[in-house]
Structure formats: C-alpha cells, structure tokens
Image: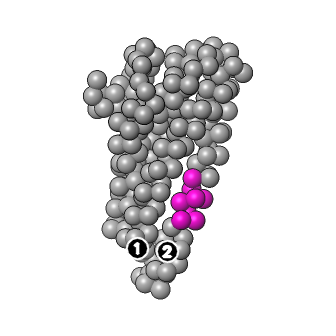
Amino acid sequence: MTIVDRIKGICLKPKDEWQVIAGESTSAADLLKNYALPLAAIGAVAGFIGSCLVGVSVLGYSYRAPIATGLISAVVGLALSLVMVYVLGLIIDALAPQFGAEKNKSQALKVAVYSFTPGWVAGALRILPSLGILALIAMCYGIYVMYLGLQQVMKAPKEKAVTYTVVVVACGIGLSIVVGLVVGAVAAPAMMAAAPGMH
C-alpha cells in the first residue's frame, strides 16, 4: 500500500482503514521513517515557507522570521513531533488496561501515528499562516480518527473508548505544549539577534 492510499483511507474511510491497519505488522522504525517523517515534514516545510518567505501580518505589521530561525524551528519541530508521536504511542499502550483495551506497543504506535494523519496533511496550510484555523479543524478530525482506532486496533470497548480518547488527547496537548516551549526556546536566541531587522 502506498503512502497516498493510506492517507486517503485514513482521512476518507477511517473505519475501514483501521481494520486493514489492525492486521498489519509494521515495525516502529518503518512507521516513523517511512510514514510519520514524510508527513510531519509537510508542516515543517510549509511552516518555514510561511514564517520566513510569506510572513505573518499582525495589526498592520508584517514580520518575516529570519531564514536561520525558520530552519532551526523547522528541524527541531520536525524531530520533536516524531518524538511526541512515539511517546503518545507509549502512553496509549500504558493506559490500555485501564480502559479494557489490549496492551500492545506496536498497535498503540500505529494508532498514535495514523491519528496524526489529518493534522499532518493540513500542515501544508501553514504556508499561509492565516489558514491556521483549518489546520485546527483537521486536528479535531484526527481526534475522531483516534477514537475509532482505539476501538478497532487497541480493542477498547466502545463505552470506554470516549474516555480513553479524552485522556490520550489531554496527554497529547501536554506534549504539544512542551514541544512548543522547546522549539520556542531553541529559536528565541536567533529571533532576538534578528529583532532590529523587523519591518
């Protein structure tokens, strides 16, 4: 199955696609390298173009991040998003027994990675920072995709799947905040150095 077929399946027919995914045996390295990395790179590249070349307008002021800052943010952000999805897989696995689901590290990683698909694809919208709200809608759809995956791949009972999803999403939000803080801390020195050049 090609990466494009998988993206279409997850985004358009998630219920059917999760059934296929549940029966696959994919190593963590393959999943992260051949699926998560190229998809996460979409948002990283689009974010770089959006912040450094297109620029952000706030209250009539236009701001373009320096190229070095944009590159550092993109690379660090990309690396951390892969770490984040891997950690989220560990969290899904660790929480499984509390929600009557089957503990299975490789299945949990599949749920984490494939649930990020809508958000990663919508990352292309970061080329125009003003379209950020659409990316947010895609991420919300990703939560629904995860809810289905927890039932079909992790075998969580339907009545516990909602709570399971909420707890995993809360952990994911916490991880996102940490990632955002780290990227900001890494990029801040370069931004400070370039501050006098703002226009």
Q: Secondary structure at mark 2?
A: helix
Name the kind of residue labelled 2 in the image.
Answer: Met
Residue 186 versus residue 93 in the image, above or below = below
Q: Earlier in the sequence, mark 1 or mark 2?
A: 1
Q: Report the residue marked by disc 2.
A: 191
Q: Identify the residue at horizontal 65%, vertical 46% (top origin).
A: 174
Residue nearest the viewer, comparing 196 with 74: 74
Q: Position of residue 109 (x, y in %)?
A: 51, 29
Classify 10 Å Cα crowding around label 2: few (below 14), some (14-19), many (20 and above). some
Q: Which residues are magenta?
A: 179-186
Q: Is residue 184 magenta?
A: yes
Q: Identify the residue at horizontal 57%, vertical 20% (top origin).
A: 104
Q: Which quadrant of the rendered structure holds the N terminus?
A: top left
Q: Identify the residue at horizontal 46%, vertical 16% (top origin).
A: 22
Q: Position of residue 73 (x, y in %)?
A: 46, 61
Which disc, if any, is residue 89? none
Name the kind of residue labelled 1 in the image.
Answer: Pro
Q: Report the residue marked by disc 1.
A: 66
